């Protein structure tokens, strides 16, 4: 089992869209039993998958041990893909983790799921606090979506510092240029400066995910966006295999 965090300290970079589409790729392309764990109180992952929490204000309870993770996991419309949805209770997660004083609580919960899932993907909130620290301890790989802008370099440097500060055996980081439009000079410059980074193009199909409430590969499999996420997933599997 491998845990993959989709993380950024900046909102609005397509983090949830990445998480949903990569989870779909894991379940559909690789045929791996996959759990998408939404740690963002907005429940954006659930919305994009057309899944609403059955039990309100319960997402926080798995961290205190009041409720098992399996009790809150919900099926999706896609084979091999399950969702652990978020809800408003997650807003108090940082305080609860501090109160519990268990620095590896998320890592232990993740490890307990290894018998049921091959891949766990975290949709992380854009924060720098105890939640992000625990995510770094639980993850085997951190994916960082980076739109092509000068601010992205600062964001990436912040994420690198956060990951490295999580411990001596910090997870590797895979930066991804997102929303790339090669007709724009700034985007071409970003691509030329980072030629080895995977790319997700700017595409209307990605914007339609929120309208369709489906991963792009499910409603437009031939699109450049679907191919981009499939290629990114291949790069992720290769990085996990190579350590």
Image (cartoon, grey):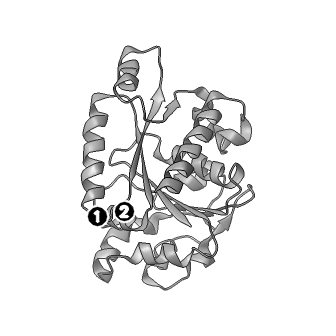
Residue at the image position 62 percent from the left and 60 percent from the top: 52
Q: Which residue is mark 1?
A: 166
Label 1 Cα crowd, 10 Å radius (few <14 / some 14-19 / many 20+): some
Residue 76 placement (x, y as % from top left): 70, 59
**Mark 1 residue element:** loop
Name the image quarter holding residue 34.
bottom right
Q: Quadrant of the N terminus?
A: bottom right
Residue position marked by numbered label 2 in the rendering: 136
Image location of residue 12, percent across then percent down: 41, 40
Does residue 123 lie above or below 209 as drawn? below
Residue 183 image point, x, y percent? 47, 13
Q: Residue at x 71, y 51 (%)?
A: 28
Q: Position of residue 140 (x, y in %)?
A: 45, 61
User: Does 60 sit above or below residue 173?
Assistant: below
Residue contact at pointers 1 and 2, CB within 8 angstroms: yes
Q: Which mark is residue 230?
A: none
**Crowding near the residue tagged with mark 2, few <14, some 14–19, many ≥20 C-alpha atoms within 10 Å:** many
């Amino acid at each position: 089992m491998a845990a993959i965090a989709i993380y950024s300290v900046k909102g609005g970079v397509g983090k949830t869209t990445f998480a949903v589409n990569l989870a779909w790729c894991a379940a559909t392309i690789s045929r791996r039993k996959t759990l998408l764990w939404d740690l963002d109180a907005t429940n954006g992952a659930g919305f994009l998958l057309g899944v609403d929490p059955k039990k309100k204000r319960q997402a926080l309870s798995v961290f205190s041990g009041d409720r098992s993770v399996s009790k809150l996991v919900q099926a999706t419309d896609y084979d091999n893909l399950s969702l652990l949805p978020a809800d408003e209770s997650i807003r108090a997660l940082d305080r609860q983790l501090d109160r519990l004083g268990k620095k590896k609580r998320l890592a232990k919960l993740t490890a307990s799921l290894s018998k049921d899932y091959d891949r766990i993907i975290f949709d992380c909130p854009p924060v720098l606090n105890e939640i992000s620290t625990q995510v770094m301890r639980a993850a085997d790989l951190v994916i960082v979506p980076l739109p092509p802008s000068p601010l992205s370099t600062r964001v990436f440097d912040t994420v690198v510092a956060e990951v490295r500060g999580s411990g001596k055996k910090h997870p590797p980081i895979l930066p991804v240029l997102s929303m790339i439009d090669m007709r724009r000079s700034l985007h071409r410059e970003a691509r030329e400066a980072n030629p080895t980074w995977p790319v997700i193009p700017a595409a209307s199909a990605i914007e339609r995910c929120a309208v369709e409430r489906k991963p792009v590969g499910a409603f437009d499999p031939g699109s450049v966006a679907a191919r981009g996420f499939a290629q990114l997933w291949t790069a992720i599997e290769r990085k996990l295999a190579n350590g």
